[in-house]
Amino acid sequence: MKHLIAPSLLAADFGHIADAVKLINESEADWLHIDVMDGVFVPNISFGFPVLKAVQPLLQKPMDVHLMIVEPEKYVQRFRDAGADVITVHAEACVHLHSVVQQIKSSGAKAGVSLNPHTPISQVLHILEDVDMVLVMSVNPGFGGQKFIYSALDKIRQLREEITVRNLDVLIEVDGGIGLQNAEEVLRAGANVLVAGSAVFKAENPIETIHRLKSIGVNNILV
């Protein structure tokens, strides 16, 4: 499959969110990535239900919601009701991860599980058959604009091998420090969804940047 581009709203101008959504609609972006932070699991606080509900009627692409929060099981249905098409929770934040994944799928959303840079892929191997996507964090969560952690490439390769061996239809999303300087390398490692925040919204021409990210040649990549 052709890789997907999911620009992150976290890097947009919060004073002009409607304009950012319009840009996504008019671009070749596949999803809009929304990072939800609670100030507990990560140091910052970002978007809540009112913002998602305001974005949803404007957005013509799927809403990819990344929950960087504790006890996400308490809020799955509310995020689905607010417009989330994909809901990703952190393995580190879920005591009963399998149950939360099933809760997400029961809500009608696609289910993702995210791994922080220090978390091995062993934390998700037992539920690979149950998820639609694994999100590999290539920065420490909580802040935009960080530099890509290159050890994430090994984690992506390991996940891709496991998914291929099991013949599963599971996406690998990568979030953090992604831009034109490293996107092809990330795709070659086995990713097929790229989250790009600053690289898109801080670019001189965001739509052209999305086009260039989407147009990266990926011949012979197992995605």
Image (tube, rainbow, N blue to C red):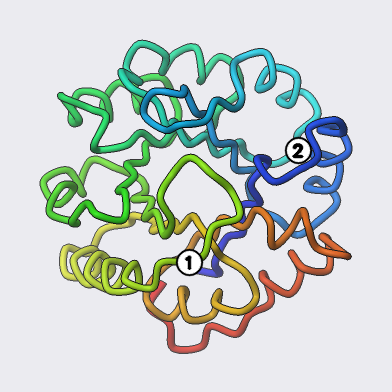
Distance from label 1 to label 2 (Cα)? 29 Å
Classify residue 173 by image quadrant: bottom left
Q: What residue type is disc 2 on?
A: Gln
x and y percent of residue 222 in the render? Answer: 38, 78
Tell me if 157 is positioned left or right of 83 in this view.
left
Q: Which residue is mark 2?
A: 60
Residue 150, image x and y in percent?
A: 38, 73
Q: Residue at x 50, y 28 (%)?
A: 37
Q: Residues within 10 Å of mark 1 (few under 14, many from 20)?
A: some
Give the image location of residue 29, x and y in percent: 70, 55
Q: Residue at x 55, y 39 (%)?
A: 64
Dot placed on the residue nearer the N-terminal end, 1 or 2: 2
Q: Which residue is mark 1?
A: 148
- Residue at coordinates 47% horizontally, 65% vertically from top-left? 192
Q: Which mark is residue 91?
A: none
Amino acid type assigned to the residue bearing label 1 in the image: Phe
Residue sticking out furthest to the bottom: 220
**Rendered position, 144 above or below 101:** below
Element at badge 2? loop
| Above or below, 92 relative to 96 | below
Q: Nearer the viewer, residue 11 or 207?
A: 11
Q: Secondary structure at mark 1?
A: loop
For the image, the number of numbered tags is 2
